[in-house]
Image (spheres, rainbow, N blue to C red):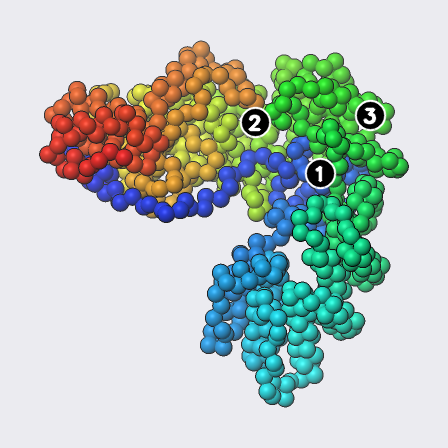
Amino acid sequence: MKNARTVLGLVGLAVLLPPVIADACGPDFGPDPRFHIVDNPDRPFDSYSAGRLGVLRRTLDLPYLAFAWRSMMGIPTTADEQKHLVAGWGDAEGRYGPDPWWASNQWTAVRQEVVPAGDLRQLDSIRLADQSSASYIHGDAFLHAAVTARALAKEWKRRPALLTEWVGNQDTVLGGGCALSMPAPGIEESLTPREKARRQAERDYQAAAMHLYCGKYDAAAEGFQALANTADSPYRTLAAYLVARTRVREAMFGMPEGEGYPERVDATVLARFTRAEEAIQKVLADPKLREVHGPTRRLLSIVRWRLSPETWRCELFSRVLEKGTGSGLESDLAGISFTLDADGNAVTCPGLKPRAAELSAWLQLMSTRPPDEAGIPEAPWPAKAFGTAVARWKKSAHLPWLVLALLSARADAPEVPELLADAEKVPVESPAGLTLAWHSVQLLRERGALTEARARLDAIPVALVRDLPSADNFLREERLHLANSWDEALRNAAQLVVDEDGASSHQDWNAQTPETVAMGLSPIWASFLESHVPTRRMREWVALPGLSPALRRQLSWAVFARAAVVGDDETLKAQAATLAEAEPKARAELLAVVGRPTVEERLFDARLLLMGLPVVSARLEPNRDRLANVSPQLDLTEDLSWFRNGWCVPGTKNLEAPPGTPGPLPFASPEERADAASEWKALNEAGSSVAFFSRVALDWAKAHPADPRSPIALFRAVRSSKRGCGQNTPEAKKAFAWLHKQYGKTEWARRSPYVY
């Protein structure tokens, strides 16, 4: 950047601004980060499967709630069951297993890794994915092929011809072909008996899989059964399962188009499903096939839903409470559901055993959302849910009912003190303990018992939530609610991102070193902090040691920009000096701001600088922001299509906190509350960055027509309207008109031939 010693010291960023990168289609941003669990527990699922349930929510899917019931009722879960729960839940949350397109790319990469390129036919990855999709080949088939290819590459290291043949046949299977290639002449002549047997097993497996995908179900079933009957076959166990899977696929694909779920089946289809169940039961009856009992029981659910849906649905409430079901527990949990009558009420199952009936009743009440979450008017059922939970808790002393009672309770309910006393007796380390402790803190706070609420909150060991970021976020929110100082409040203001792929251990909220996991702000908390924390306190927040580096960078610039917008000169100077040390590319411009002799000059130069930095926002941007980036190569001047450039109008036009957040922070002084309210009002009145920049540039140019910075500011304001919030605003049009009227012969007017 240019040296800031001249009056045009801030021009550098504008001159260096690269051409706009315009994308024909928007980039894949991915989903917004999560800060709380919604329908599934935190990943990895190992903690949940072991009974460390974290903070339970009513929005969890039924399988997870049913498992929580088991855990709270003390039904043990074996290591084998936990292993299969983790795998099954991973597949479920991956939306039915690995994405076929991604998985097919893994296969394409591995086949090139294990076989010389000259020996392979070229594959079109898009065509492969399309052909596989037409044959209903799931992603796990590609991954299985990739794993097998690597294993065979080691076993057949000295037999490259065998591996080339196998890869060619696998291409046929996964590409929708219906005929394997003929064996190459003489390929078996020098093979050992072991190599011959493995080659034949692989070829037989590929042939059976090919028949399956080509709809030749009898041939596929016969092929898999032959492998299952071969004692030394590496596919003996898997093939036995695939016989059942073949018969289920045959029945499913033979159903008339457009059938509902669960479907009514005619005699022909009924016979196919009956034959599928026979194959399934054969697998389940063999203890040697226990390894595949889990997926086989999932097939059983598919079949039973067609043959006897209501009977099977009711049976599952008992099955999920059984001990030692091994790999079958996850499959049974996955089938838990309710049938609704015409009025939307769950249909009860007659004749259930007491414990299964109790589970069913708890799930019905637990999984129905309260009116404030569902967005519907107040209805009588919440009081009924609370009353039922309290009565069942007093009668049975079963912890799930105490959990439901607290989750359904209103703070002023007369039963709450007794429920809180009962909850305090439950060890926080128990499956229900963290949920009870967290909601006890909420209810105590809402009842005004702040000292007791803080005591219960402080009694929760950090170790319990170190690998549960969503549970930790709940506790951080309560610490913010109950904070006694700015330091305590701001240490809990940022939230941990719940990783979709797997959680890593995070630090204590009071950490003295930068957080190593991702952090951010949800929209509701970003709005609350904007409206209740004055800019100078936000600067203190940025300085706290526990922030992640990416969030620190984002907030550092936000504080500088906000100070410039709302006119906080003290914070502006201090933050500009701090940023100058951390941002070498902007150092000259930032120090130039600090060096201006008057408040008016400093504010204008800071705002002029912001006009050239589309990456920077004066708002606390929630979720995933482009400035939450630690790369020293990040170009602050880059103006991108489909990304945030500058900032948009704040969402609310009043000073009230969004629903679900605390009111004014109790420890804030009257002056601080007034400053926060005044700055929030100024931020709202400033509007979008395009409108704000245009007004600043136009007002300055009118007041300082001879200032060489005036046409630069007008140019930057007009340019910001191309990709920023507020395109074609009246303010931008006025800035454009004034630029061409007063400075039409300048370089800046020539570089802005039209307004966007």
Q: Nearer the viewer, residue 709 or 318?
A: 318
Q: Nearer the viewer, mark 3 or mark 2?
A: 3
Q: Which residue is mark 1?
A: 62
Q: Residue at x 76, y 47 (%)?
A: 264
Say what secondary structure mark 3 lies in.
helix
For the residue marked with disc 2, what is the amino acid? Glu
The location of residue 691, given as percent across then percent down, is 30, 26
Q: Is residue 149 left or right of residue 735?
A: right
Q: Which residue is mark 2?
A: 477
Q: Is residue 126 left or right of residue 346?
A: left
Say what secondary structure mark 2 lies in.
helix
Q: Quadrant of residue 64?
A: top right
Q: Quadrant of the C terminus?
A: top left
The location of residue 543, given as percent across then percent down, is 42, 31
Say what secondary structure mark 1 lies in.
helix
Q: Nearer the viewer, mark 1 or mark 2?
A: 1
Q: Nearer the viewer, mark 3 or mark 1?
A: 1
Q: Which residue is mark 3?
A: 392
User: Which numbered disc, 3 or 2, marks the residue that appears first in the sequence?
Assistant: 3
